[in-house]
Image: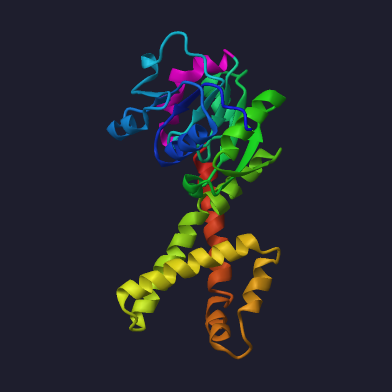
Amino acid sequence: MTEALPPILLLGGGRMGGAMLAGWRERGLAPSFVIDPAPAAAALAGDGVQVVTAADGLPPGFAPAAVVLAVKPQQADAALPGVARFAGHGAVMLSIMAGRTIAGLQTMLGTGASVVRAMPNTPAAIRQGITVACPAPGVTPAQKALCDGLLASVGEVTWVDDERLIDPVTAVSGGGPAYVFLLAELLERAAAEQGIPPALARQLARVTVAGSGALLAASTEDASALRVAVTSPAGTTERALAVLMQDAAWPALMSSAIDAATRRSRELAS
């Protein structure tokens, strides 16, 4: 049986923070708190979790084992000083903010803060996420294990030692669900343009994308091998791929898109 999680402080109860909190509750969570001034965040209360609008609403004796920084990166300068005191009391600071570096976080939280920088993605909402995490020097094995447990509650977790990888990870898997949803959106539109009724176009696009993802997850073959397997020589799929795989089409556009997102992640550090 998986051991229950210790008290956690969640800073930011938005979509990702709320998804992670739901995963922690399923595992078992000691009495914990969420800081979020948004009225909608109040719905996160219950089952041993209280929501407060600011750090000064926390009870004096509350001592979280981890503080999960889930606010938008643009809100970090205003939000983090209120929880910096916990870094000095042994709590590990687990950041899921895009772009914010370990060094930058330690400047705001204190140079001795134990910081883990991580990037999950939105399939965490159905416990199918993927997170890549990087620990700062000085993070203890116990703190790393706690962060691993928090992140594993919503999907797979991989650790890296090179923090520079987190920016392209943000571009690939952090933003990846949006690219897949765009594919479904465009596939539905193209189907409608060919005269397929809207409801059927939507069903075909959604189930095709979801089913293909499930097949990819269940297969040990490379994505390229699965693509070749469904592409009959001189058939309809081959004709479509001849358009999509032109040098100026999907291959170049995807590389450019990931590069743009990676550069933006680095810009958010400043």
Find out whether residue 140 is within the magenta segment: no
Location of residue 157 (image quadrant)? top right
- Residue ranking furthest to the left: 39
**Residue 161: x %, y % from top left:** 71, 38
Identify which residue is drawn at 54% across, 33% down: 27
Identify which residue is drawn at 34% across, 81% down: 196
Compared to 91, does 203 lie above or below?
below
**Residue 88: x %, y % from top left:** 57, 13
Compared to 223, does 106 lie above or below?
above
Q: Is residue 152 left or right of residue 121?
A: right
Identify which residue is drawn at 54% across, 43% down: 120
Q: Report if residue 139 is visible in the image.
A: no
**Residue 225: x %, y % from top left:** 68, 72
Compared to 190, does 116 lie above or below?
above
Which of the two residues, 265 or 186, is positioned nearer the viewer here?
186
Please give the range of residues in magenta: 74-89
Compared to 174, does 219 lie above or below?
below
Which of the two residues, 109 or 268, is positioned nearer the viewer here?
109
User: Dominant secondary structure of the magenta stretch?
Assistant: helix
Q: Report if residue 108 is visible in the image.
A: yes
- Residue ranking furthest to the bottom: 234
Identify which residue is drawn at 51% across, 22% down: 30
Quarter occupied by the N terminus:
top right
Which of the two residues, 210 or 141, is positioned nearer the viewer here?
210
Q: Is residue 129 left or right of residue 60?
A: right
- Residue ranking furthest to the top: 60
**Residue 63: x %, y % from top left:** 52, 14
Looking at the rendered structure, the number of numbered marks drawn on it comes to: 0
Q: How is the image coloured?
A: rainbow
Find out whether residue 87 is within the magenta segment: yes
